[in-house]
Amino acid sequence: MMTKIMQCPKCKYKVGSKDIHSKEGECPSCGVIYEKYFAYLQRQQASNVKSYAVTKKAALNDNKAIRTKALGEFIKRSFLHLPEQTDSLSYWSRMIGFALFALWGLKFMLQGIDSDALMGSFMHNVNLPFHEAGHIFFIPFGRFMTILGGSLFQVLLPFGLMLGFVFYQKEIFGAAIMLWWTGQSLIDISPYIDDAIQRNLPLIGGMGESAHDWGNLLRMTDMLQHTHTIANICFVFGYLLILASYAWGFYYFSRMRYKIR
């Protein structure tokens, strides 16, 4: 049984005693059939909800497209920025230098986690002072960070220089070389990590086994059983960064050859 309507939902006519003889379910003023009108309102509401959902989805897609475009522009502007032109001498000297770094990087990548080869390399002697400085810089952050600081600073230094070349110097050639160094630093750390259990590597100043950075770090974090896995992850990550530096350098030289004046 239909509830008695006291006011028309369409024209707002108030049904009174004078309308006692009007047709039930129909407005005496505008003649609208209440049941049909309510059904119409429900369809309209459902349509509005659907329209809102479609509009919202379209807006989200538009925002996503805008963010994607903005990210692309940021990458192009920062990491793929190229100077307007270069001279022939600068171009070819840079190419030769980068080729030497590329061949040198292949040596580190192909020899694997070889402690004798890595610890005896020229780059290990370059990394070592920054490694030791890292221990000092991180002293205010506690014992764990003081120990980790050596390896951490050894990697963060070239990575920070890479960001400086990208955002301040706008020089992606120098950034590619710094990325190469970052990858090499990770490879340089990998045999140190791998030695955490055996602790056979000679330490600077003849310090004993108790001063072994990664032996202490992995013992403190109860991860000594994962020593080889962590060492391999560090090596592979360094390997990939060196490959990325090659791709970056290739991009630079392939585009700049059209800008030689």
Image (spheres, rainbow, N blue to C red):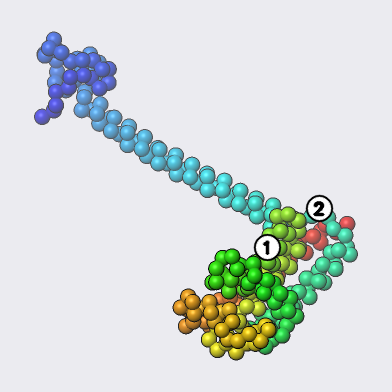
Residue 13 horizontal side relative to residue 179, left or right: left
Q: Position of residue 217 (x, y in %)?
A: 53, 77
Label 2 sits on residue: 84
Q: CA distance from mark 2 to mark 1?
A: 25 Å
Query: Regarding mark 2 in the picture, which secondary structure is present there?
Result: loop
Residue in the picture at 73% in, 79% down? 125
Which amino acid is tagged 2? Glu
- Residue plotted at (14% across, 26% down): 3
Q: Hey, which quadrant is residue 82 in on the image?
A: bottom right
State the image coordinates of residue 123 (x, y, percent, origin top left): 73, 78
Residue at which label 1 appears:
160
Q: Is residue 89 above or below residue 21?
A: below
Q: Is residue 50 left or right of residue 204?
A: left
Which of the marked residues, 2 or 1, is nearer the chain's N terminus? 2
Contact, mark 2 vs mark 1 (Cβ under 8 Å): no
| Tag nearer the camera, 2 or 1 | 1
Q: How many numbered marks have been drawn onto this rendered protein structure? A: 2
Horizontally, is 91 left or right of 77 in the view? right
Report if residue 46 is visible in the image: yes
Residue at 56%, 84% in the rendered image: 210
Q: Residue placed at 52% from the left, 45% from the top?
A: 63
The three-letter amino acid code for the residue at tag 1 is: Gly
Observer-nearest residue: 29 or 169?
A: 169
Image-quadrant location for residue 253: bottom right
Q: Nearer the viewer, residue 96 or 7?
A: 96
Instruction: Tell me the quadrant of the picture where the C terminus can be found.
Output: bottom right
Quick check: can you spot residue 229? Answer: no
Q: Position of residue 238 (x, y in %)?
A: 63, 74
Rendered-image quadrant of the N terminus: top left
Q: Secondary structure at mark 1?
A: helix
